[in-house]
Amino acid sequence: IPKIDAALKLSNNLSKLLLDLAKDFNHRSLKKCHERGHTKIRRSHSSLFSNLGFEAVRLTELAERAGITQQAMGKLVKEMERVGYVKRHIDESDKRAKIIELTEQGVVLVNDSMEIVDEVIAEYTSAMGQEGILDLEGVLRKSVSSLGISKVPDNWQETKGQINAA
């Protein structure tokens, strides 16, 4: 029985449940993204787009927001620049810095992604109910805030009850 208890504890704990939910959400989102014609997008690219928004941002700030190295973010930017979603240029106020911004194709991707998130949330709401999804989001927001682990830039407005589930 101790072996079964250990297996259950390791396969069904908070960390594993959160990872499983995140993987599922990402899988559903990526599949819908590909269905909309954005076939060059991979799961790793979400750390670029979820931290870029619609404004031009320095590469160093993007990497910091995503919690990855500048080299790793630079690689993601290079990949997405090659396929036309972002462009980079020199920061005129500091010639050493690179500014990253969306192209027109990138804006389409971000707009599609916002719709896709709503679609996935609607699927979750169908399975969990409106109250369940709002409770989940509320607990997660409170947890992230209480633990001080939010990476949302200060200049981005956080809205209460962000989920607009159908």
Image (cartoon, grey):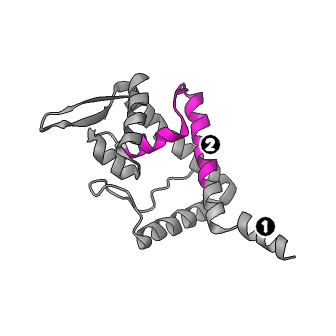
Q: Nearer the viewer, mark 1 or mark 2?
A: 1
Asked if the stretch drawn in magenta spans residue 46, the answer is yes
Mark 2 residue type: His
Name the element at disc 1: helix
Q: Which of the 4 image quadrants contains residue 56? A: top left
* Cα distance in 3D space between marks 1 and 2: 25 Å
Instruction: Kindly identify the residue that appears in the image at 52 percent across and 69 percent down.
Output: 139
Residue 125 visible somewhere in the drawing? no
- 24 or 43: nearer the eye? 43
Asked if the stretch drawn in magenta spans residue 23, the answer is yes
Q: Residue furthest right?
A: 1
Which portion, as a residue range, is magenta?
Answer: 22-51
On screen, residue 2 above or below 81: below
Q: Position of residue 31 (x, y in %)?
A: 61, 35
Q: Is residue 93 left or right of residue 23?
A: left
Q: Residue furthest bottom?
A: 2
Q: Is residue 106 left or right of residue 3?
A: left
